[in-house]
Image (cartoon, rainbow, N blue to C red):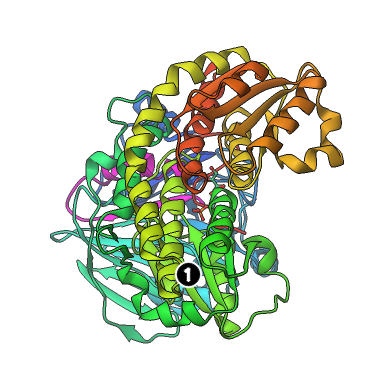
Amino acid sequence: MCGIVGYIGNKEAWPVLVKGLERLEYRGYDSAGVAILHGGNFSVYKKKGRVAELSKFVKNENKENIFGGVGIAHTRWATHGEPSDRNAHPHLSSGGDIVIVHNGIIENYLSIKKILTEKGYKFISDTDTEVLANLIEDIKKNARVNIDEAVRLALKQVVGAYAIIVLSKDDPNTMVIAKVGSPVVIGMGRGEFFVASDATPIVEYTKKVVYLEDREMAIIKNKKLTIKTIDNKIKNPYFQKLQMKIDELEKGGFPHFMLKEIFDQPRSIEDSMRGRINIKNAVVKLGGIENYLDKLVNAKRILIIACGTSWHAGLEAKYFFEEFSLIPVGVEYASEFRYRNPVIYKDDIVIVISQSGETADTLAALQLAKEKGATVLGICNVVGASIPRATDAGIYTHAGPEIGVASTKAFTAQITALLLLCLCLAKEKNILNKKRMKELLTELEKIPKKVKEVLKVDEVVKKIAKEFKNAKNFIFLGRGYGFPLALEGALKLKEISYIHAEGFAMGEMKHGSIALVDENMPVVFIATKGPLYEKVVSNMMEVKARKGKIIAILSKGDKNIKKIADYVIEIPETSDVMMPFIASIPLQLLAYYVALFRGCDIDKPRNLAKSVTVE
Ligand code: F6R
């Protein structure tokens, strides 16, 4: 969480930094700030709220000092200290020599703060970051070292996670960047450098980038880049070419990124399977994990680890793997797994799933699984992010940048990749014969078209959303492949509309939760045709008998359910296993339109950030 941007070069830094912050706002939007080196001093502008507030403030009153070719900027997701102008980054040191932006948490900041306070340092904010600014200033002054060495020595005292960019007014041609745990990427232009939490603020200026590894720092001095470890070992920069396109970062005529991303799913699902299936030969080819197929075949168990929506994709995968590759699967919340003493065997396969590839808990769980000797595979969307770099091997989902905070196309791309992995394993284990494999792949290939078709329910869902925009609660119910979808439907609704919602395994209702149902309770049923259809109908009757308002997602033409439900959303028929690809779409649309009618900030829901890089 939090986004950081830096620029050093011949351009005016301000517009580069502000545009960069807008791109990174998905990481947090409690406050925004910019520091520019202007006339030998730092001009620092910061404001509670969005980047737009900061721009408005500067435009109206404070233009004069924003000119200069060196600067840093920050968009915040608050951890230490409430969202306010005072706690907004960048933070200056007491003497005004150092300015810093920081993404992460300095865990031992209180003990450092105590020592610095005794030395006479004054603190304006409640943040851990201001402590680091003063620590760097203190070391620089007392050890009489230059800025890069002062940063390095300070970081040796620091415990926690960080990506930082530091400037010193005494050394105007130097920018220092360092990271542990939080991501940072450096773009190299002609005589200029761009720094950011991810590549989105950089891509329009240069495609040549280097991702810093943990415990590395970069020093840009007199237009030259040096990379070393915090232990002072020089490293060779490893430059990569960005594949990202700028139009993927724009709304493209849609009012919100979330709606754009929902409608992008026929394309994103297709891209997730592109080049990976061969129906004629009934094979799935996953280049990234090819060398690990033997290990997969011999594994006694798969453990899937993720958070939030990615966890729901993992739960779908449990059903895939158990049905087609006959292997036991455990699905774990990364935040729980990492703090237990999980029993892991050397022949376990651990699969971590993450859209961003930066989720702190998932990354820590991955590291724990590796320490315990498991083989770790990743399913990730963001190329080059920390998680895919830390796994043994993996599959990219190729959904393209997902910018709306609520995950939509990442979920369907994740289940596509996971189903492909499962089918690949089933083939290797000779569990599926060629005919069955061909049938499944043929059906999978049709999914993008069916998703295009299901998107036509847009207007129907909009009407239903309008009816329920003032609901206080929602229940989502599913069985089998529908159960993870029920959890996902509830999560989508609560995170962007702030309506309390819960998802349940339908059969569990009568063990307590059905007590919630009365005439005011909207209950969304995933009620498509499948092996558990009869049971779904019975559960629906139970809710109807208690006067719940039934919204059913059903297979096209199902007259039976139409008679029972109060509201229906018909979706194209497909096999039970492929149903989650299709039925997730109306759930996403329902959340979107309810939030729209409630006037919520859909792409930037309160209290959330897209990339959860703190634990
Ligand atoms: C919900 C959502 C979150 C993420 C979760 C994990 O819409 O987006 O629940 O799924 O924070 O993030 P990643 O997949 O980036 O690890």
Q: Residue at x 47, y 44 (%)?
A: 575
> What residue span does the magenta drawing correspond to?
1-26
Residue 280: image x %, image y %?
Answer: 24, 59
Is 529 on the left-hand or right-hand side of 336?
left
Total tally of numbered discs in the picture: 1
What's the amino acid at mark 1? Ile
Residue 346: image x %, image y %?
Answer: 58, 86
Q: Residue at x 53, y 57 (%)?
A: 320
Question: In terms of depth relative to the viewer, which is nearer, 236 or 544?
Answer: 544
Residue 301: image x %, image y %?
Answer: 60, 74
Q: Residue furthest left?
A: 190
Q: Give yes or no for residue 16 being in the magenta stretch.
A: yes
Q: Give yes or no for residue 38 being in the magenta stretch.
A: no
Question: In terms of depth relative to the viewer, which is nearer, 549 or 200?
Answer: 549
Question: In terms of depth relative to the viewer, which is nearer, 145 or 369?
Answer: 369
Residue 328 visible? The answer is yes
In which quadrant of the rendered image does the C terminus lie? bottom right
Residue 79 lies, with reference to residue 377, above or below; the image says above
Residue 169 visible? The answer is no
- The secondary element bearing badge 1 is classed as loop
Residue 414: image x %, image y %?
Answer: 45, 53
Is 405 on the left-hand or right-hand side of 64?
right
Residue 4 lies, with reference to residue 281, above or below; the image says above
Q: Quadrant of residue 524?
A: top right
Residue 62 lies, with reference to residue 560, above or below; the image says below
Q: Residue at x 61, y 61 (%)?
A: 121
Q: Decide if ligand 1 comes within 8 Å of the CB at mark 1.
A: no
Q: Residue at x 42, y 63 (%)?
A: 423
Residue 489 lies, with reference to residue 483, above or below; the image says above
Is 536 on the left-hand or right-hand side of 244?
right
Residue at the spot of label 1: 431
Label 1 crowding class (10 Å Cα cut-off): few <14, some 14-19, many 20+? some
